[in-house]
Image (cartoon, rainbow, N blue to C red):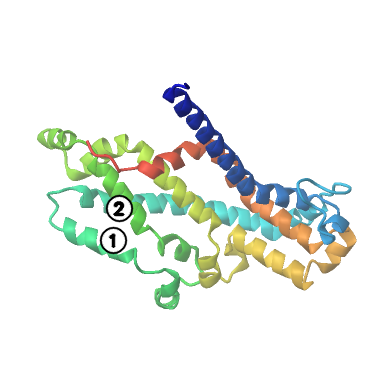
Amino acid sequence: MPHPSGKRIDAGIAADLLINTLLVVICAAMLYPFVYVLAASISSPEAIRENRVILGPVGPLSSEAYRLVFNDARIWVGYANTIFYAVVGTAINLAVTVLAAYPMSRKKFRGRKFMNVFVSMTMFISATGMMIPLFLVVKSFGLLDTRLSLLIVFAAFPFFIILMRSFLETIPEELFEAARIDGASEWTILFRVALPVSGAALATIGLYYLINRWNGYFWAMVFISDPDKLPLQVVLRQLIVAARMGEELDMSIERAGTTAEAVKYAAIVVSTAPIAAVYPFLQKYFVKGVTLGSVKG
């Protein structure tokens, strides 16, 4: 008679096998678009037109699509603008988030309840639904078609303020009381006590802000019309639209022996490569972000 524990072991092995198989399938489904885009960007024009690209490059390898993308001066201007918006914008986001989250995390702060309710309520308002009012406000302040419009309009997101507040609430109150006994002001406590132990929270939230800034293009199209101030994502979108409509790049594509589709795929690779390159080194912060501030004590 077989032992019951043997059945449990067999069931555990089967469950692990099923879960691992499912994870492999999910990973393959998530990775395939990246593999396809990269393969199509260097495949022959004929293979792209005939939809023969599946898992790898087909036909003679060609880098003409990348040459057309990088030869466009707008790409480099867009890269510089995106780096500026991402770095400066993320710094502003973190500063505003910390300054808003710290008083919300202090139980003795009189306006704590009001601020918590107010910030929480703004999460139910869609930013895109406020497009026209935001546009009118930016225009009334004379910020239309300026870099400041992209930097300060979305200076902080309520979700990340609440996330940072939750983390600050997990810091033992004894640390703050000891600092107050030593005569420290609230600014000193914030910069000398709270922030030094909030490295993981700042890194996690800053990373989310950075990726949001890097990928942003919608509000740049709303607020910015000067080509010299457009971020990379908007420039690439214009380049793809121009290639599809036969504007500006049509003759260059014909001479280069490539297709508008290849240019589109090359543009996608160019825009995602920097973030994809640093993501493996920062992945641990995404994992921390799932449980950030969820445990007290």
Give the residue at x 58% y 60%. 231
Q: Position of residue 225 (x, y in %)?
A: 57, 71
Give the residue at x 62% y 67%. 227
Q: State whether residue 166 is above or below residue 151.
A: above
Q: Quadrant of residue 178?
A: top left
Quarter of the picture holding the C terminus: top left
Identify the amino acid type marked 1: Ser
Q: Position of residue 255 (x, y in %)?
A: 89, 61
Q: Residues within 10 Å of mark 1 (few under 14, many from 20)?
A: some
For the residues marked 1 and 2, what is the alpha-carbon distance in whole angstroms?
8 Å
Q: State whether residue 176 is above or below residue 165.
A: above
Q: Where is residue 219 in the image (x, y as percent from the top left)?
A: 50, 67
193 relative position to 83: left or right: left
Q: Which mark is residue 162?
A: 2
Q: Name the residue under label 1.
A: 120
Identify the amino acid type marked 2: Ile
Give the residue at x 61% y 48%. 30
104 relative position to 26: left or right: left
**Of the residues under marks 1 and 2, which one precedes in the sequence?**
1
Which secondary structure lies at badge 1?
Answer: helix
Which secondary structure lies at badge 2?
Answer: helix
Name the residue at the left extreme.
Answer: 181
Q: Is residue 96 visible?
A: no
Q: Are marks 1 and 2 in contact (CB under 8 Å)?
A: yes
